[in-house]
Every structure is written in C-alpha cells, then in structure tokens.
Image (tube, rainbow, N blue to C red):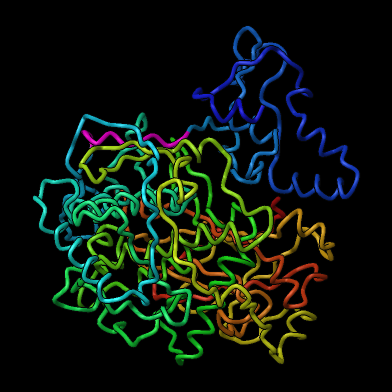
Amino acid sequence: MASFFLTQPLMTTTIPTISKASLCPFFKNRSQTPSNAKRKNKVLSRRSSISCMAREGGDQKNPNIDSNGVGKLDRRNVLFGLGGLYGVAGLQGSEQFAIAEPLLPPDLSKCSTPSGLPQGIKTECCPPFSDEIIDFKPPLRAPLRVRPAAHAVDSEYIAKYNEATKRMRELDENDPRNFMQQAKVHCAYCNGSYDQVNYPELDIQVHNSWLFFPFHRWYLHFYEKILGKLIDDPTFALPFWNWDHPSGMQMPAMFTNKSSALYDEKRSNKHQPPSIVDLNFSTKDEKSYQEQVNENLSVMYQSMVSGAKLPLLFFGEPYSQGSEKEPGAGTVERTPHTAVHIWGGSERNREPNGEDMGNFYSAGRDPLFYCHHANVDRMWNLWKTVGGPKRKDIKDPDFLDAAFLFYDENARLVRVKVRDCLDTKRLGYIYEDVPLPWLYKKQKPHKSKYLKMLKSLGVARASDAKRVALSDFPVTLTDSMITAVVQRPTKGRSKEEKEEEEEVLVIEGIEFDKELAVKFDVYINDEDAPGADKSEFAGSFGNVPHKLKPGAQHSKVSLKLGISDLLDDVGADDDESIIVALVPKSNYPVTIGGIKIELVS
C-alpha cells in the first residue's frame, strides 16, 4: 500500500463502497492496542476530532461521496490512516480533510514584480524566461565535491572562490547564471513573484515550512555548479560558515576584504570580526565572549538534539499546493538560521530594511548568504546522524514530489523534485568532517531561589511579568514578558512512552508584521529568563523581514517546541502543569493566539 501512494499522481483515489468502520482501521486499531491505549486515544481526541468522510450510500452533504455511493478518499487522509509521518496532529481544523498535492514548479512566464517588497523598494525579481525545461538527472561518475569549513580554507581556495564569484558578477546581465540573476531566484520564491499554479491568488513561499531545507539545498547546488563551470573546476565546492563551532563563530575573513568579489557593503558594521555571532540574536542582549560561546552551543544542542527529535519539529509544518499560509518553521530555520540573517544584515540606521542579509528580497545579493546556507544545509545531513531511528527524511509524497525550477551551469532551465536531493552524495557533494562541540552541550538548570516557589505556588515571581490566564488569549506581547500556567496532557511518563511520543509545546495563532524582525524567547518554569544556555530555555520565534501580497503580512503561524527532555532536566516531569514565559526580544508587537501542549508521535 505505501508504495502505491508514493507513485500515484492523482489527488484522490476512487474506492468501492465500503463501511465507515472499514475506512478507519487506524483509529479502530488504536482503540485495541494493549498498553496505554486509553491514554493515547484521549490525547488523540484532545488534539482533533476525527470522523470518516466516506460511507455507504450517497450523501449530498459530503463532497467525498458521489451519487452512486462511491467514496473518494483523499490521498492525504489515507496516508494518515496508514500512520503517515505527521499523523492527524499535523493538520488543524478544516485542513484535516483538504485535498492536498505537492507544490508544482512556478510558471516563469507569469513571474511578476513583487507586490510585497518593503515600502519604497522597487526591484525586479524575475530571472530570464525560458520555455524549454529539462528534468533533473543525477550526475554519473562525477568527481565528489567536498565543501570545506570557511574559517579553515587556505589562500589558494580563497583566490579560486573569489575568481569564480568575480566571473559570475561579470556575466551578461541577462545570463541566468549572472550573480544578480541568481540573487533574484531567492527574491522571487520568497516575496510573491510566483503564484501557485492553479491558485493565482496564492503566492509560493519557501520559508517557514518543510520546503525550507530542500529548496535551499537545490538553490546552492546549482549556484555551486555555476561557479565551478566558470573556473573550469568540477570539484569546486562552496565553503560552509562553521558558526556551530567556536573557531568559526566570527564572520569568515574571506568575506571582509573590500577589494574582493566576496565583499558586500550592505553588511553589519558592528558585527565584523572579531565580533562573535549570536545564534539567538537579540537587539537587547549583550554578553561576554565566553557567555556567547556557551549560549551558541546550547542553542545548537536545543535546535539539533533535544528540541528536534521528530521530523515535524526539525523540518517544519507541511506546505502543499493550495496552502494559504506559511504554517510554521522547524528548529534550525527558526534558530540559528534566522538569527544569523538578522545579525549579518546592515544596521537599520544605514539600511532601513536590514539589507542585504537581513531581508529575504536582498539576501541573495550577499555572497555570505550562500556560505551561511551551506552550513544550514549541513545541519540537515547531521540531524540524521546525531540521534535515534526517528531522524529520517519525510516520506509524505506532498513533500517528496514538491518541485522547483532552477538554471544550471549550462544556463538550462531544470525541473527538480525534493525526492532527488535527500542524499547529497547523489548530488555529488559532501561536507568536510569537523568536530561538533554542541552535540553534548546539554543545558544546565537555572538554580533560581524562586524555583520551588514557582512549582508549589504557581505565581509570578516579579511585578514585571504579566500573568495571563489561557482564557484571556489572544494577548499582545510588547516590551515585557507574559506568563501562563499550562496544563499537561499527562505526567510521569515512562522512558518508553517518551520515546514513542514527544511532549510538544504549541504557541499558536502568532500574528505579526512580517516586514519586521520580530523575535521572542520561550522559557518553562523560570520567570527570571536566565538565557539560552539554561535548561529552562525551550526555544525562540524569529522572523527574517519579508512581505507577500498586500494584507498577507499579518497571517498567523504556529511555533512547536519539543519539551520532553527539558521537563526532565528541570525536574518538572511529575508536574500537572508548567509555567510558560514568553520574553520579547525585539521592539515590535506580536499577538499570541493561545498556548497548549500536545503529545506527538
């Protein structure tokens, strides 16, 4: 059965008339499982109300039943019934039974000037048009490219990289391989230049969802191949900015030479070397060198290990053809990816929109962008090797068959699918093997004198922390933290139960102006907000400024944080409720729709 659903192009599958009970074997079986079955089914019912849409006989009220009593079962629902990756909890509300299909590649002939650029910005994001499209084929017997750590390369490599970038900048301005044309690719896919095929009212957006990793992997692959072609070196590989290691936490020196093709004047002046990168970037915090290193390593541990134990948490939320919003980013995309973008962009008193790195429309104009995203891409490889058996690529065909268009090193327009980029060796490259100091950087609990009081009384520690009842949501987060007591679905779970289901804190209905660099941190059972290097730190929400069509900048997203390990670390596993603190780290308001906890398998 599983292989059938991986290969069928149809949106729906017509099935014979069958009983309602036989349509729901997954839910029926769950009620019959021996251990913890009652608890699991209670949790399932709390997460969503499930019913079978197809049944015997015609049903005028049910669009999934035709007049002959034949049920048309949505492919996605069948996948859920078979125990698909995200299960029923992956979709909310009416989306549970929406007909879904993989995102189709854009129609380049309909590319338009972005309507959602920052105020006063006029730029063209459409690459050259071609109506000749070829399908990607993996290289055969190509030399394996090894992407090196940027801080450790030699002068010969820097000279080669600089020359390749120089030649890319010098290409004819209408050549799709030209540096600025390559930068337009990111702008177009991220700022509303492309409408979804068959959904002209909806934009394509490759951030804040499960498309984030595969889109940028393909983007860098072709960019790298173009560079190699221009210097006639098929072994040339992009460097990765090794910001996850103390020796690589400064902006790589090769990008700071003002006479180099790798230089971009629209970068932060404040954050030039020897300034150390802040992987949980905030405009409000100042830390010593060692404090920053410790916090960076802890952020990496949270984003790659403790908070990313499930594909749902690491990759982000599903995004398919017809999706109307950016559903929610995964751990690495939120932090450190977003933090490095904002940290590397120009100060607002120089460039009001944070150009170049600090805004989606302009990020691709800075060569540092590709070095940064090479390390982001490296995280995808590492994630599958640093944990248990659940760390696998997504199997949902809506993910695997999502498609994009890129120009290759020969200026040919190539159609690619996500399924063909899961293995970097198949694309012809690997990463240099370097130490991972964050892998065992488990955060330490904050030994606050208030901790016992917080657990026993459940009251606010200080007057500057606003306690909010869950019934009072939605609330607005401005310049001071807010806290809320949140009930857990269960307590005192066994090790086996925790392996089977992750406890996930859901901050839902997050509404903000996407044109702004919004950020807030989340802490559990500590209203002192001790820092990202402490166990109480659950994660962050951040936004790289961008806009879509008018009115879209205030769409709502969700933040999902895995907290099973955290609750063990802070001694809260036996508590019936926890105190959640939301701490603003920017000067912009954010509306929070609600807070809850789910068990996700």
Does residue 109 show up magenta in the picture?
A: yes
What is the x, y in percent for residue 241?
38, 70
**Whole-percent x, y for residue 64 in the image:** 60, 20
The one of 214 and 453 positioned closer to us in this rendering:
214
How would you classify the magenta stretch by its main secondary structure?
A: loop
State the quadrant of the N terminus. Answer: top right
Outermost residue toward the right?
A: 34
Residue 471 visible in the shown view? no
Most foreground residue, 138 or 477: 138
Number of labels in the image equals: 0
Magenta residues span 102-110
x%, y% of residue 547? 31, 55
Decide if residue 279 is on the left or right side of residue 482. left
Q: Name the residue: 67% across, 53% down.
A: 390
Q: Toward which corner of the image does residue 362 lie, by quadrant? A: bottom left
Residue 334, placed above or below residue 204? below
